[in-house]
Image (cartoon, rainbow, N blue to C red):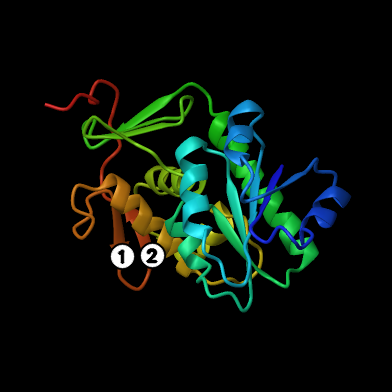
Amino acid sequence: MLIIKEDELRSSLVEPYLRKDGWRTLVVGEGQSFMRMLGDDPPNLAILELGTQSVCAEYLCRKIRERSHVPIIVVVPLKSDWNPIDALYHGADDYVVSPIDPEEFVAKAHVVFRRSWVYTNQVSHSVSYGRGRLVIDYRNQDVQFDGRQVMLTNTEYTLLKTICESTHRTLTRSELMRNILGYRIEVDTRSIDVHIKNIRRKLETNPREPEIVLTVRGSGYKMGLSKDRVGESAVH
């Protein structure tokens, strides 16, 4: 696990809890060449610890996401000048506000890692929707819409896949939070909305008039395209 600290003068908040849980950790400063580490020996998880006056948060999230699919958890101080939800807009998979609860944080680390493992170890299998307009290749971590490849984070991919597989029903925000993100506690479901906005921005031709992930007012989200039958996956 790679822990990237924005404030290099302070010790890591989360490393002791992770080491106690059995994780192998490497702590680096945001000024160090952590990007090389993502390529040479990719970590299973990246933790980004922000300072109270973060100036590099957006940059760090974007740079990591440009280089790697590694899941990212951002740790944001309670009195930070930076809105933690912004982390989700810039490629993070989850965030935690400190002071943190050690058990909750370690549990989140396991959930995000498990979600990433499932994402990268799907059976070789492709599914298409809307007569081939949307194609999800599980094995190659590939999502395409109208022939255009779409880069999604692990969380975005998991949400999209789950909504697609629930073609005939509406999924509430609480369901998505519990079943997809693995939370057993009450948390702010706005993070689901942020992930959905990111999916639409990357996937939809017109995010303001979505065709794929539809909002059911007062309920949640549902799939807007029908799953293709065998032999129906070509766009005409």
Find residue 118 and report its image quarter: top right
The residue depicted at 27 percent of the width and 48 percent of the height is: 212
The front one of 221 and 169 is 221
- How far from the left and from the top, in percent, is residue 193? 41, 64
Q: Are marks 1 and 2 in contact (CB under 8 Å)?
A: yes
Residue that mark 1 sits on: 216
Q: Secondary structure at mark 2?
A: strand
Kind of residue sitting beneath label 2 = Gly
Along the viewing direction, whichever of 171 and 5 lies nearer the viewer:
5
Tell me: residue 120, above or below residue 181.
Answer: above
- With 111 as the anchor, is 160 left or right in this view? left
Tell me the residue at 54%/36% (across/down). Answer: 119
Horizontal arrangement in the rendering, residue 72 relative to residue 229 (left or right)? right
Q: Residue 62, image x and y in percent?
A: 46, 48
What residue is pinned by disc 2? 220
Does residue 150 show up? Answer: yes
The residue type indicated by label 1 comes to Val
Q: Is residue 47 above or below residue 151?
A: below
In space, the residues marked 1 and 2 are separated at their CA atoms by 5 Å
In this orientation, does residue 223 appear?
A: no
Quadrant that contains the N terminus:
top right
Q: Position of residue 23 (x, y in %)?
A: 80, 43
Residue in the image at 85% along x and 55% along y: 16
Q: How many marks?
A: 2
Q: Quadrant of residue 114?
A: top right
Residue at the spot 77% in from the left edge and 58% down from the top edge: 12
| 93 on left or right of 167 | right
Quadrant holding the C terminus: top left
Where does the image place residue 183, in percent across and percent down from the top left? 63, 61
Between 30 and 62, the one lying in front of the other is 30
